[in-house]
Image (cartoon, rainbow, N blue to C red):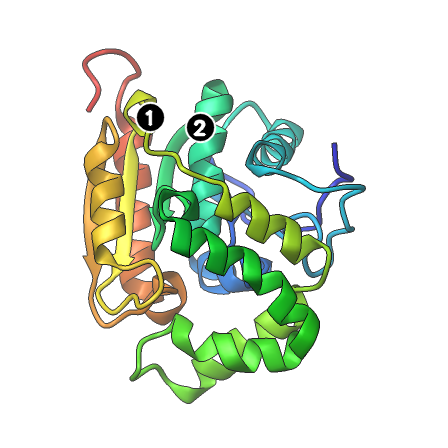
Amino acid sequence: MSAPVHTVQAGDRGPLLLCLHGIGSSSAAFAPQLAELSAHARVVAWDAPGYAMSPDPPGPLDLDGYADTAAALIRSHGASAHVLGVSWGGVIALRLAARHPGLVDSLIVADSGPGSGTDPAKADAMRARAEELAGLGPTAFAERRGPRLVSPHAPPALVRHVIDTMATAVRLPGYAYAAASMASADLRGELADLTVPALVLCGDQDRVTGIEASQALAGALHKAAYVIVKDAGHLANQEQPAHFNAWVRAHLDIVTEQPKGPSCL
């Protein structure tokens, strides 16, 4: 088990909303959600083990290890949580729901898919990222990768924020462990067994995961609503926060008001 992770928190009422960032980011990715959704929920955003202000794990973590760390974080805040995961964070959220179903009230999975292990070429490319980071260093690595995470017409200030967030978040060995966990992930066989309500979102200009992967993800889940976020790339929660947050609020309103049981959607 890794050491406790660093978190940023906002809000003191409502359901717990745990936010899990993408593979090249940190809790800073959820600034728009911390600012707005904290009026409706207790929002907690983590720095994954080995990222940003969280300590390096004592050894490699696989996907189960990240999910178990997230589970421990939920337990430290209460009985259960709604889990919002972006990209790699979405993959962790899905495995978390599979391994610890009693801790996950619902899922919000953004610009994600069932894992890079579904395609050998994608898996190889994901594993190669650690060597790229080692060769370039965090700043040049972020300058190369960051702009592709938003749409071609994203405001320059957002592009700069994405780059700076990545440059300060990623380091070895944490990034290498994360890339390896993503490269080996193939969740297709377990998605249909997830029974919690899910909201799946994807930017219409996502050039990383892409609409097809998120559509397939939504179609495989037992109870899912699917939303395309217009004028957004891979980081829809940052590029179109007003629309993204409105969908998340609506999802939380629906799932928190529904009685639990077989009659629920």
- Front position in the image: 97 or 84: 97
Residue 244 placement: quadrant? bottom left
Q: Residue at x 20, y 51 (%)?
A: 227
Q: Is residue 208 found left or right of 216 in the rendered image?
A: right
- In this view of the protein, can residue 9 be seen by the observer? no
Which labelled disc corresponds to residue 196? 1
Question: Which label lies toward us, 2 or 1?
Answer: 2
Q: Amino acid at mark 1?
A: Val
Residue 215 in picture, x, y percent from top left: 20, 47
Kind of element beneath mark 2: helix
- Would you place residue 86 above or below residue 222 in this image? below
Q: Mark 2 — residue?
A: 97
Q: Residue furthest bottom?
A: 156
Kind of element beneath mark 1: loop
- Front position in the image: 127 or 63: 127
Q: Residue at x 58, y 70 (%)?
A: 166
Q: Which circle's residue, 2 or 1, is located before the other in the chain?
A: 2
Q: Amino acid at mark 2?
A: Ala
Structural distance between the alpha carbons of marks 2 and 1: 8 Å
Q: Residue at x 44, y 42 (%)?
A: 91
Residue 177 in picture, x, y percent from top left: 65, 49
User: Where does the N terminus fall, quadrant-wise?
Assistant: top right
